[in-house]
Image (cartoon, rainbow, N blue to C red):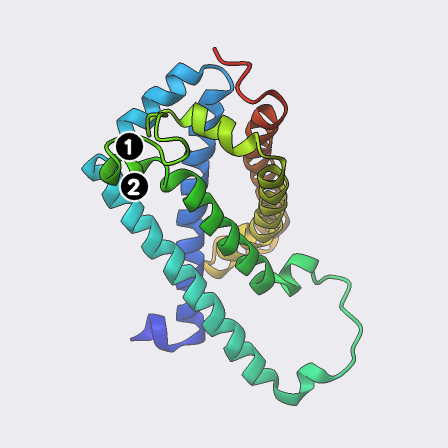
Amino acid sequence: MWLTNSSIGRKVIMSVTGVALILFLTFHACMNLVVLFSEEAYNTVCEMLGANWYAIAATLGLAALVALHFIFAIVLTLQNRKARGASRYEVTSKPAQVEWASQNMLVLGIIVVLGMALHLFNFWYNMMFAEIANGGMAYIDQMTPATDGAAIMAYTFGNPYFTIIYLVWFAAIWFHLTHGFWSALQTLGWSGKIWFNRWRVIGNVYVTVLMLIFVVVALKYALCAGCCAA
């Protein structure tokens, strides 16, 4: 099949899944933004999603997107290494126009995936999974409802080690996305000579605002541990 057997096809899969994941992060950021104004409203959103069939289906779809994106990232990286052969060991100066993120996308991707595993443990395990398997109670204390996302945030970010790890994770996602945003559009043919720099600027601003929302929410609970509850 062209999409999986050719280099261009694999890049298209990477681009499409990447754009889809950015859209998911946008939804996630908008959802988290609610908690800055009302924990009650945020918990209502958590309850609407929870372990409902459509949320479970969306979670499975998201897992498939992540798996495809990560697998094809590895395939393309190995393919590029093989194509370069021994030349990759030569000592050369780094071209000024090549971004640091572009040179380290696989490493950034691995950090993103590891951070995602921790995030799933802290939140999905204590929320959706706990709602299904633990009688609706989060595993953190067996007393907090699995739909009380604000309390689970307070518990998680009340731990300074978790907060530091999350901030590193957010930084890795930022680097990954600032390159991935315009790169995906370029692969899909949406950035000609005029729009190339425009998409880079738009992508940098968009991704920065997106990640700042996550950072602000984390810092709110790290510094306040839920004392600003609405």
195 or 158, which is in the foreground? 158
Give the residue at the far bottom of this rendering.
86
Circle 2: residue type: Phe
Q: Mark 1 = which residue?
A: 50
Name the residue: 27% across, 34% down.
Answer: 131
Tell me the distance, in whole angstroms, between the alpha carbons under discs 1 and 2: 9 Å
Q: For mark 2, what is the residue?
A: 129
Number of marks: 2
On the rendered structure, is 189 left or right of 161?
Answer: left
Q: Is residue 191 visible?
A: no
Return the residue nearer the eye: 102 or 219.
Answer: 219
Give above or below for 129 relative to 114.
above
| Camera-nearest label, 1 or 2 | 2
Along the viewing direction, whichever of 78 and 186 lies nearer the viewer: 78
In the image, what residue occupies the spot 37% across and 41% down? 124
Residue for point 60% across, 55% down: 193
Badge 2 marks a residue whose secondary structure is helix
Q: Is residue 203 left or right of residue 67?
A: right
Secondary structure beneath dot 1 equals loop
Please, what is the three-letter code of the amino acid marked with disc 1?
Gly
Q: Position of residue 166 (x, y in %)?
A: 58, 42
Q: Residue at x 80, y 73 (%)?
A: 93
Where is residue 110, by image quadrant? Answer: bottom right
* Residue 220 in which image quadrant: top right
The disc, 1 or 2, on the residue closer to the chain's N-terminal end is: 1
Foreground of the two, 229 or 181: 229
**Up-down: is 123 above or below 194?**
above
Q: Residues within 10 Å of mark 1 (few under 14, many from 20)?
A: many
